[in-house]
Image: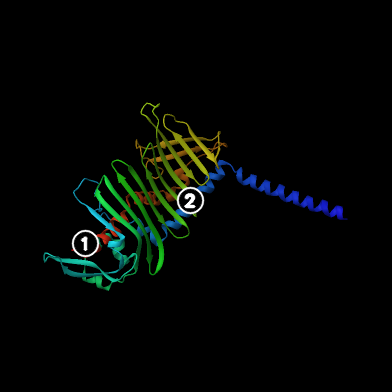
Amino acid sequence: MKRQGTIILITVFLSAIIFSCTKTNFVDNASLKESINQSAMDLNNAVTAISATKAYSILTVNDGSVKSATGEDTPYRVYITLDSVKGIYNYHPVTRKNRWGISLLRYFTKTTDDSKMIVRMPLKKVEHPRSLRQYALSDSSLTNNFEIAVSDYHNNYNNYHDFDYLLASEISIDNTVAGQLNINYFKSPSLGITYASQYAFTDSYTADYKYQSGDTTVSSFAISKAGTILYEEKRLTIKNDTLWFGREHQYILTIGNVTITRKSGTRDVTVSVDGVEQPNAIVEIVDNDSDTEASVCKKRDVQITFEDGTVTTISALIGNSVENIKTLFDSLHEVYFAAYIVDWIAYDIYYQRNW
């Protein structure tokens, strides 16, 4: 009986191992078609969730205001650190006079000392940045239901070719955290460019844009959930003296566990699932116009012919998400919210203290 019991236990154990391996292999060996369909569905669900958040409409705000940095050489200089603007401020426009007796309208009144720059203001003003610098009598009825807490800030602007900028902030609406914006931007004629901006939304979703110059220049835009990439477009420009123009270009598109890669100098495109190349798949990258910065949400599409002969495109798979992805990409690249809201507030507070 003891021997029979031992045999039964071994049989059950081996069956469990076989079942586990079979299940794992089934997942790992999912076809390209199944993988790209599932990955596109996960991406669409993520973009739908992100675009429904309160932070999305705020962090991607763009009402055509003039940015704080025009991109042109100017004699303008500014050096603002967190220490020079920290404190708790409320939106409360008042008329003051500067040292020359000129009447000025100051929009933010300091109420308390703090290690951060915390600003409370009406959400309506944030949603329409141009109105932030204008005051109407009806504004007195608005409540300060929006808050931005800046825990790190450094704005050292010399000219368009030489500056460094740092921002770490959290936004809240009606006393509920809605998201975070973080930016680290460095530009130097001798040291090149390093840039990273990130929106962190609720439900562990993040959107990132990164750029790094050098012998290998890398630019990328990604949407992730809890650290897992749902969508990423990456471009690499690699110094290679053996090539005609001395540079090799690579374009890498990742959607879930599917990666599509094209190198310059060839029309061949490789596609892989979980790092395993799919040699029988036919992939073609179609650019609707000659644009070196073409992307899926801007003048680019990717056509895939599966092993069973069926054909689809990335635009067909994520069509409902393309415009929102484009909005995220553009706003992370240009960081309108930082220029229109955060920097302007910091300028107002800084010059209010120093005039």
> What residue lies at 79% left-to-right and 50% top-to-bottom?
11
Please identify, in this view, whether the residue under mark 2 or under mark 1 is nearer the observer. 1
Q: Are marks 2 and 1 in contact (CB under 8 Å)?
A: no
Question: Horizontally, is 315 left or right of 153 in the view?
Answer: right
Q: CA distance from mark 2 to mark 1?
A: 44 Å
Location of residue 298 with respect to 335 vertically, above or below: above
Question: Horizontally, is 185 left or right of 15 in the view?
Answer: left
Task: Tell me residue 216's x, y (percent).
Answer: 40, 37
Location of residue 14 with respect to 249 vertically, above or below: below
Provide the residue designation for mark 2: 43
Count of all numbered marks drawn on residues in the image:
2
Provide the residue designation for mark 1: 351
Circle 2 sits in a helix, a strand or a loop, which is it? helix
Circle 1 sits in a helix, a strand or a loop, which is it? helix
Task: Tell me residue 236's x, y (percent).
Answer: 41, 38
Instruction: In the rendered structure, find residue 173 and report the number of the disc placed on it.
Output: none
Residue 121 visible, this angle: no
Q: Estimate how packed mark 2 is, as few (under 14), some (14 to 19) or many (20 or more) residues with alpha carbons within 10 Å.
A: many
- The amino acid type found where label 1 is placed reads Tyr
Q: Point out the image quarter for the N terminus.
A: bottom right
> What residue lies at 50% left-to-right and 35% top-to-bottom?
270
- Image quadrant assignment for residue 211: top left
- The amino acid type found where label 2 is placed reads Leu
Task: Tell me residue 251's x, y (percent).
Answer: 43, 38
